[in-house]
Image (cartoon, coloured by chain):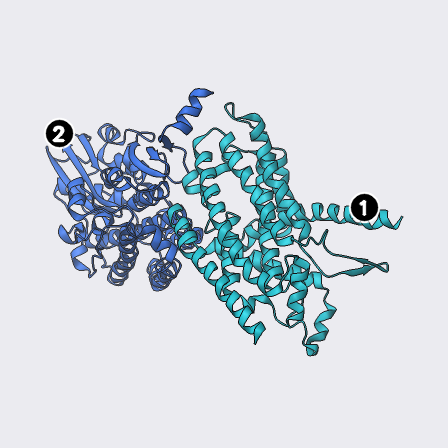
Amino acid sequence: MNFLIDYILIPLIKIALLLAIVPGYVAIITLAERKVIAWMQVRLGPMRVGPWGILQMVADPLKLLIKEDIVPVRADRWIFTLAPVICLIPAFIVLAVIPFGPTINIFGKPVNLYITDLNIGVLYVLSISSVGVLGIILGGWASNSKYPLLGALRSAAQMVSYEVALGFSIIGVLMLSGTLSLVSIVEAQKTSNVWYVFLQPVGFILFFVCGVAETNRAPFDLPEAESELVAGFHTEYSGFRFSLFFLAEYANMLTVAAMAVTLFWGGWLRPFPNVSALAFLDLIPGVVWFVAKVVVFLYFYLWFRASWPRYRYDQLMKLGWQFMLPISIANVIVTAILVVLLNKG
Amino acid sequence: MSTQEETLFDASEITVSMGPQHPSTHGVLQVKLKLDGERVIDAECVIGYLHRGVEKLGEAQTYGQFVPTLDRMDYIAAVSNCLGYCETIEKLLGIQAPPRAQYIRVIMTELNRITSHLLWLGTHALDIGAMTVFLYAFREREEILKIFENYCGARLTTHMFRIGGTQYEIYDGFQDQVRAFIRDFPKHVDEYETLLTENRIWIGRTRGVGVISAKDAVDIGLTGPSLRGSGLEWDLRKAKPYAIYSDFEFDIPTGETGDTYDRYMVRIEEMRQSARIVGQAVEKIPDGPIMAKLSKIIKPPVGDIYHSIEAPKGELGYYIVSDGSTQAYRARVRPPSFVNLKALRQMVRGHMVADVVAIIGTLDIVLGEIDR
């Protein structure tokens, strides 16, 4: 009986919750995106649907759902159908290892606020999130149209090249914590008395910039640069299929923000986790700290979008290979030397 | 299926048709791009999707009736179109608008130049991905359109002037409204500049993109900010003063290298200079009539005339042949956008697809004027 509850019922409930929360989060962030960017641009944003337009987050997905589903005649039907799904599934399952909070007690039963704690959590996130790009390439390819093809090629090149720097930017954290498990990394930040962002500032900046590039968001939103490629890889997609791509993109934003928080900003930990004078901050549950930090990073995404022009393809590649990658490797080397020296001394 | 795959994936060159329904071709321009990967090998412009036969209409309507039609050419800068035409006919008739009308004309035309440049700035930045500038620019544009609306009731196709002067007196509070705008406007230009001028990405996207040397620019016939960006100080307001521009102090900004960034800086500075002209003009509007003495039926003497003005986009010229009747025998427009568009092919060669939209933006074309 206990076995059933521990290994089947509770994980199933957690998975169901996560599957419910992510689309809800996407609905909220789309509205937030429109509102925040509108405020930055001296306008109001959606105001008509519900008070202050808050029901817009219902109206937007509803509109997408009832739209006509168009498949171009010359498209490769199977791949065309499959591509958004390939894009979406990794975006969801990658969240399985994100620790949203510490272990809490519900009805006297300890419950972990994550679905699983893999001992190779970081590798899992990196590898699964790479699968998403396959969906984009296939989608652009299967559309059998020129703009989507250009968009897909761009994003393939972009995501592959930034993944390298992204991987290197994390290594510093791994050396400090000595573990690949995301939960252990957060706990290591507690025992070391300091969030890793203060030990790895360069690593963090590289990680976040590469993360923005990985998720194809401004100023790296080349694959869907509307002024050049109309809508990039999803030009030929409409209705629900389009919304799957959309969902995946925003879920990936969440992943990057959550990873940034977990790896560098202490996950669910409160500020100064071991300073007892600030113990009253413990009244706020860890999951709230986590969400608050994630919201900050999601806000950065929107802020970037409102502020910056878009990189050009070759400039993006140059930035990735000639700038980000050397710095991230240098960061790894410097961190390694320091870790060895300080531990010996 | 096999043929499609060959053209898409096996050939090293692909032809992409950009427009006429493309978000950043600024209207219904079609550019056929020959691409090698993302690099542009060649480009061909297809125009004519917006052709309405404006010039032919000019031969079928009386001189006075033709004026509102001209608003539909460069609809972003309708006031300039109107000024150019009215002055051409006045020159043909050998009359001059009274000073008060001249001052109103200059104020309106320069305000219109600002709206045109603001719209260019917004859309150009939007093409390159900076979306916020667009809305900031439209905020100020709205203020000018309100002045236009108060003055003549229309915001875009204003039909502001008449042959021989202006139809409407300025309204109460006009000067205050214009002064208030001119007072705040330079601050707003600084605001746009903080978003773009020193932004690394913006510089990366515009420096060295779409370079055209002064010699090539002259050979093609570029005019307006596109020419001045290449370093040539040629502005009809100074070179061949018309209206009363010789009464005002202003500078002609020029670029050095003739790239997209220089043209951006030229237009930004031109907005400041236009505001300067308006500021001078609004302080000394003379009293007097606003219409010259003119018969109700306009019958210019037999002859032909060419007159051109510095429209926001370049030299806007009118060539009118009169046969002594109430209608022109031939009405011909030299639209700046049409001539400037010729530079596109030379400018985009060797650049990337993303630069094509930047270059279309920097040429500041309006299809209503190109197709007429």
Quadrant hosting residue B368: top left
Q: Secondary structure at mark 2?
A: loop
| Same chain for the residues under marks 2 and 1 in the image | no
- Per the image, the residue denoted by label 2 is B323
Which numbered disc covers residue B340?
none
Examine the rendering and report whether any part of residue B372 can be seen. no
Dot 1 lies on which element? helix
Q: Chain of mark 2?
A: B
Residue B338: % across, % down: 25, 37
Please tell me whether mark 2 or mark 1 is closer to you in this view: 1
Task: Where is residue B70? Give x, y as percent.
Answer: 28, 37
| Residue A119, placed above or below residue A145 | below
Residue visible at 61% across and 36% down? A85
Total labels drawn: 2
If the image is split into quadrants, where does the C terminus of chain B sit? top left
Q: Does residue A334 appear anywhere in the picture? A: yes
Amino acid type at circle 1 is Ile
Residue B149's place in the image compared with B275, above or below, is above
Badge 1 is on which residue?
A8
Residue B125: % across, % down: 38, 50
Farthest-out residue, right:
A1
- From the image, state the color of chain B: blue
